[in-house]
Image (tube, rainbow, N blue to C red):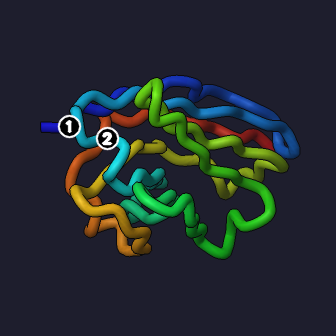
Amino acid sequence: QVQLVESGGGLVQAGGSLRRSCAASGRTFSSYAMAWLRQAPGKERDFVAAMSGNDGSTGYVDSVKGRFTISRDNARNMVYLQMNSLKPEDTAVYYCATRPRPGVTHPASAYTYWGPGTQVTVSS
C-alpha cells in the first residue's frame, strides 16, 4: 500500500511560482512512476506531469511544458512539482499520484493511488 501526502499549495498571483511537495510511503516507491494530476471546478481530473521510476524520463501535458518541472528524491521518498509563470487557468486541486509500474503514461486514470489533494489558486 502506498500513501501520499501533498503540501505547498496556496494562493499566488499570475506570473508567480509555487513548489508542490509530496511525501510517499511504501518500500517500492523508487520503482513506481510518480505523477501530478489536477482537477479544476466542474472538470475531470487531468494529467499534469509524471516521472518514471527507472530511467528518469518525464512527461507533461502541453499546457504546462516549459513552465512546470517534476522531480523526485528517492532517498527521501519525495516528489516535487515546481510551477513557474502560473496562469489563472492553472487554478485547481492538485493531487500527487502513483502507479505500481515504472513507466510514464498520460491518462490520469492510469494512476491508481492519489493523495488527498491541495488547492492552488492563481489570481489574475
Badge 1 crowding class, 10 Å Cα cut-off, few under 14, some 14 to 19, many 20 or more, is some
Q: Give the residue furthest to the left.
A: 1
Quadrant (top left/top right/bottom left/bottom right) for the C terminus: top right
Q: Which secondary structure, mark 1?
A: loop
Measured from the top left, where is residue 5 in percent x and y?
36, 27
| Residue type highlighted by circle 1 | Val
Q: Is residue 9 left or right of residue 2?
A: right
**Residue 67 seen:** yes
Task: Kindly indicate whether the residue at mark 2 contacts the one at mark 1 (C-beta within 8 angstroms).
Answer: yes
The structure residue drawn at horizontal position 33% and vertical position 51%, both measured from the top left corner, is 31
Residue 29: which disc? 2
Quadrant (top left/top right/bottom left/bottom right) for the N terminus: top left
- Residue 121, located in which quarter of the rendered image? top right
Disc 1: which residue: 2
Measured from the top left, where is residue 25 in percent x and y?
27, 28
Residue in front for this viewpoint, 70 or 73: 73
The vertical placement of 41 against 72, above or below, is below
Measured from the top left, where is residue 24 in percent x and y?
34, 31
